[in-house]
Amino acid sequence: MTRPFIQVHHRGDRGVDGILRLIELAGHDGPMEAMLTAMCDELAAITEVDIASVYVREDDRLVMRGNHGFAASAIGTTLLVGEGITGLVAECMRPVSAEHAAAEAAYKPVPGLGEERFPVFVGVPLICAGAVIGVLVMQRRKRPFASDEVTLATALGAPITLAIERRLNTAVRSARLSGLAHVPGAVLGRAGVVPTTTALGAPPIELERAFARLRDDLGRAMRKLADSTVPAVGAALDRFALLLCDARLRERLAAVADKPDGLRTVAKEYARAPWKLGTVHESADHVADVEELCVLLGDPRSLRPGSIWIADRINAFIAIAAVARGASALVASDLVAPAAIAVARAANLPVVSDVPGLFGWARPGDLLAVDGESGAVLVHPAPTDIERLRRQR
């Protein structure tokens, strides 16, 4: 009896590598033309065609937004839906192939494009929610497209459809928000949402591991902020260190660590008993510190390096953790505490506060652009805004 054979398809298979690359490109940010042109390059390599073009539907027009094989000036070529063979593909919502496109009644030449050199044509509709959002076109000099090649072209249209659909969906939620700028700097990154204490309903935590992670955060932050002589920065780091060593708090956390809402319970207890903690000012600071410590203990995954941390309010401990974990900016819908601003400024971390509508527009993983000079926060910025931001950096 023969043993079953398992084969891992490593890099080097042009078809498999190309398809995986198409899927990867579908999630890329930046100008749509650059993304779709890169996808056309992969399509041409997979199918061995001379020309690969992607037309995106914009109202009643089809606009070439990606191409392999023609001159760069071809980008922007426009046809009406129903115009030419490409327009016919969009109109009938079915693949269309032709052995010699120019001989077909539906053919419409585009001056200066030079497509007459590549007469063999196949076009595939890119369909989303029952409507055509674009057309994939492939052309070559010789040999009509066989049925299995049309099938392959149709399948390869899926990641392109995904890429266009993703852009259309994010465009619906794009917004320009304004807040108060505190620390200058222009950055582009994905949103990472800092949970509130009321959202701390996570599974039971491994307390020792969580505290060890925060001790590591404190160590990294101290190294990054070592050159700062601002008293507020040193005081914030000291408070962080002292709270990590607070035996009474540690005992209370240990008592509830196995409960799903344990961290939330501790945070609420401190918020409800300020009179036990000293003066009103001291108690407010301490409550904020404990709340943020509980948030950081309970949320090890969503706050990633390079992300833009967004929160309702930001106090010193979140700012320290952001510096330690390599956040790219801090944005709050409400206030950012002076101590947090001092920490961020010492680390050159852009900060914007008082951004109305922040959580109405931005969601975890959304692409954000933050301008710490003007206080602008762009949700799913347009390609032109992305390019402008990159020039600023």
Image: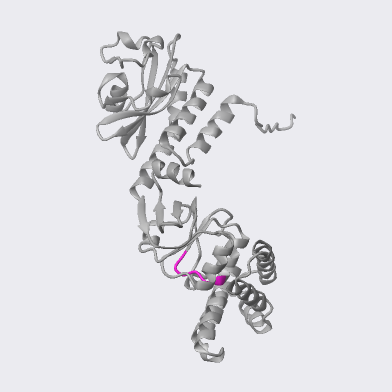
Quarter of the figure with residue 333: bottom left
Which color scheme does this rendered protein use? one colour
Q: Is residue 100 left or right of residue 187?
A: left
The residue lying toward the viewer, choosing from 226 and 150, is 226
Seen at 64% across and 64% down, the residue is 225
Majority secondary structure of the magenta segment? loop
Residue 335 lies within the magenta run: no
Up-down: is 286 above or below 7?
Answer: below
Quarter of the figure with residue 56: top left
- In this orientation, does residue 228 appear? yes
Seen at 47% across and 16% down, the residue is 50
The image shows residue 185 at horizontal and vertical percentages of 49, 55
Q: Which residues are magenta?
A: 311-316
Quarter of the N terminus within the rendering:
top right
Quarter of the figure with residue 13: top right
Q: Is residue 164 left or right of residue 234?
A: left
The image shows residue 190 at horizontal and vertical percentages of 49, 52
Seen at 42% across and 33% down, the residue is 33
Up-down: is 379 above or below 264?
Answer: above
The image shows residue 142 at horizontal and vertical percentages of 45, 8
Seen at 45% across and 54% down, the residue is 370
